[in-house]
């Protein structure tokens, strides 16, 4: 017994497919999601996505820049099916490209909102988000550049900006990919070491302080280090902040570990 062949899509059905795709494209969040909607619509229109070197492929490119260029081949090679695809594809791809461009703009805006423009590190909003996700396996390190106000006052803000950028580069190169680095504000920076023993974090911060002092003679960085415990990251950050200023009072350019008494809520 021969299996029944599905009826070929008519113009009304094709219009319904395109309308459904247009509505779906309004809800996508990424270029990849827009490409997936487009591929599904192509399939529902009776097409098959194929490589660019297929002699029967129809323009335009339906990859949306996701992966290699790809084109459409009609599954049913009737004149009506081919013409229907030729008629529907351009507007469908145009809608998908517009949706993908909108997603790109949104992602760039979101990235700018999360990233400190000067250093390229995570910005304060992203820092707060990461701190809220911290667990008792994390170590928080707060650092403040010594003599930064004097640098700005004597050499100007451009010199201060260069110092911040360079320190941010050095800091980013001093941690693992699993660790988190952000600009806390002004000349303050923050590192969250994930799943690392406290002595190892202290050793790495000591190496950073010595490297910065050697690279920027006359400058330094004061660092406070605190483990996150069951009291949470806010308390640990406040403890690291108090340890940082203890390092400042001790002459700067060094690392101090938070003491038990410094694990208190931040001052108002």
Image (spheres, rainbow, N blue to C red):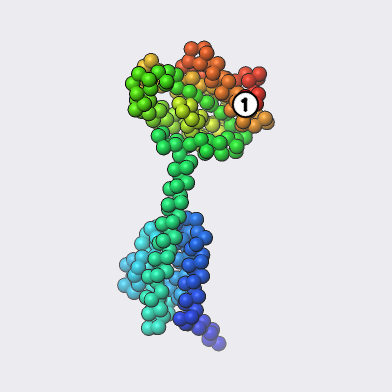
Residue drawn at x 51%, y 16% is: 248
Q: Residue furthest top?
A: 250
Residue drawn at x 40%, y 28% is: 164
x and y, in percent, of residue 36 in the image: 47, 62
Instruction: Tell how many labels.
Output: 1
Which quadrant does the N terminus fall into? bottom right
Relative placement, left or right, of 197 versus 217 is: right
Residue drawn at x 40%, y 61% is: 97
Q: Nearer the viewer, residue 142 or 161?
A: 161
Number of residues whose C-alpha sits closer than 10 Å to that of mark 1, classed few (under 14), some (14–19) or many (20 or more): few
Q: Is residue 12 visible?
A: yes
Q: Nearer the viewer, residue 231 or 66?
A: 231
x and y, in percent, of residue 38 in the image: 45, 66
x and y, in percent, of residue 226 in the image: 59, 25
- Per the image, label 1 sits on a secondary structure element best described as loop
Q: Is residue 49 visible?
A: no
Residue drawn at x 47%, y 32% is: 183
State the residue position of label 1. Answer: 268
x and y, in percent, of residue 264 in the image: 65, 24
Relative placement, left or right, of 7 versus 67 is: right
Vertically, is 89 above or below 205?
Answer: below
Q: Quadrant of residue 80?
A: bottom left
Q: Residue furthest bottom?
A: 1
Vertically, is 53 above or below 181?
Answer: below
Q: Quadrant of residue 170?
A: top left
Q: Nearer the viewer, residue 205 or 246?
A: 246
Which quadrant does the C terminus fall into? top right
Vertically, is 127 above or below 151?
Answer: below
């Amino acid at each position: 017994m021969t299996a029944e062949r599905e009826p070929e899509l008519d113009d009304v059905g094709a219009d319904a497919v395109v309308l459904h795709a247009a509505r779906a494209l309004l809800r996508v969040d990424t270029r990849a999601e827009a490409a997936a909607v487009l591929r599904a619509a192509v399939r529902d229109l009776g097409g098959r996505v194929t490589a660019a070197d297929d002699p029967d492929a129809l323009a335009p490119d339906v990859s949306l820049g996701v992966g290699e260029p790809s084109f459409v081949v009609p599954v049913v090679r009737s004149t009506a099916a081919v013409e229907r695809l030729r008629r529907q594809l351009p507007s469908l791809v145009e809608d998908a490209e517009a949706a993908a461009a909108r997603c790109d703009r949104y992602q760039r805006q979101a990235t700018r909102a999360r990233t400190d423009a000067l250093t390229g590190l995570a910005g304060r909003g992203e820092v707060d988000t990461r701190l809220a996700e911290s667990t008792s396996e994390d170590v928080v390190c707060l650092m403040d550049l010594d003599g930064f106000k004097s640098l700005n006052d004597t050499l100007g803000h451009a010199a201060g900006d260069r110092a911040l950028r360079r320190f941010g580069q050095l800091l980013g190169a001093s941690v693992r990919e699993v660790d988190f680095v952000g600009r806390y504000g002004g000349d303050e920076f923050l590192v969250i070491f994930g799943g690392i023993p406290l002595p190892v974090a202290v050793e790495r911060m000591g190496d950073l302080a010595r490297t910065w002092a050697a690279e920027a003679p006359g400058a330094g960085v004061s660092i406070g280090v605190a483990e996150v415990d069951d009291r949470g990251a806010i308390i640990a950050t406040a403890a690291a902040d108090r340890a940082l200023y203890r390092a400042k009072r001790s002459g700067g350019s060094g690392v101090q570990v938070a003491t038990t008494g410094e694990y208190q809520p931040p001052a108002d």
